[in-house]
Image (tube, rainbow, N blue to C red):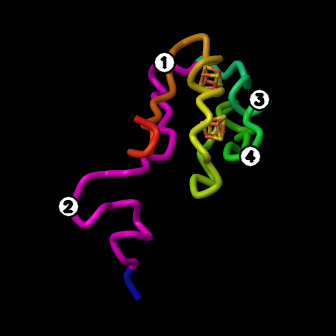
Amino acid sequence: MGSSGAEAGISHEGRELVVPPKIDYHKCEGCKICYDYCPMDVYTWDEDLKMPRVSYEDECWHCGICWMECPRRAIDIRLPAPCW
Ligand code: SF4
Ligand code: SF4
């Protein structure tokens, strides 16, 4: 069964309201800060690759901590529309 637009974070106008964090692995240096700092445990840690994974994106409340603390600016987040 497919998800509705609202469940997928898409408004009725087709605009993205909530975008989960995305990691640019070309920039990430595996410092683990995002994994350690995220208050919602959105990230898990891949021990084999020594890199974070966005594993629980639905838990992200877009606080911006990971984005602010990442020393490589490797994380992209977009705030929900009501926060603009
Ligand atoms: S804080 Fe940035 S550089 Fe460090 S592990 Fe997370 S994404 Fe990679
Ligand atoms: S924006 Fe906040 S809640 Fe979302 S992944 Fe980053 S630190 Fe976690």
Alpha carbon separation for disc pair 1 and 3: 18 Å
Q: Which residue is mark 3?
A: 37
What SS does tag 4 mark? loop
Q: Which residue is mark 4?
A: 40
**Amino acid under disc 3:** Tyr
Question: Which residue does the image show at 49% across and 46% down from the upper left?
Answer: 20
Residue 57 tag number: none
What SS does tag 3 mark? helix
Of label 1 and label 2, which has the lower sequence position? 2
- Within 8 Å of ligand 2, the CB of disc 4? yes
Residue placed most toward the observer, 50 or 3: 3
Q: Residues within 10 Å of mark 4 (few under 14, many from 20)?
A: some
Of label 1 and label 3, which has the lower sequence position? 1
**Amino acid under disc 2:** Glu
Q: Which residue is mark 2?
A: 13
Q: Residues within 10 Å of mark 2 (few under 14, many from 20)?
A: few
Q: Quadrant of ligand 2?
A: top right
Alpha carbon separation for disc pair 4 and 3: 9 Å
The answer to the question of whether label 4 and label 3 lie on touching residues, with beta carbons closer than 8 A, is no
Q: Which residue is mark 1?
A: 27
Residue placed most toward the observer, 48 or 26: 26
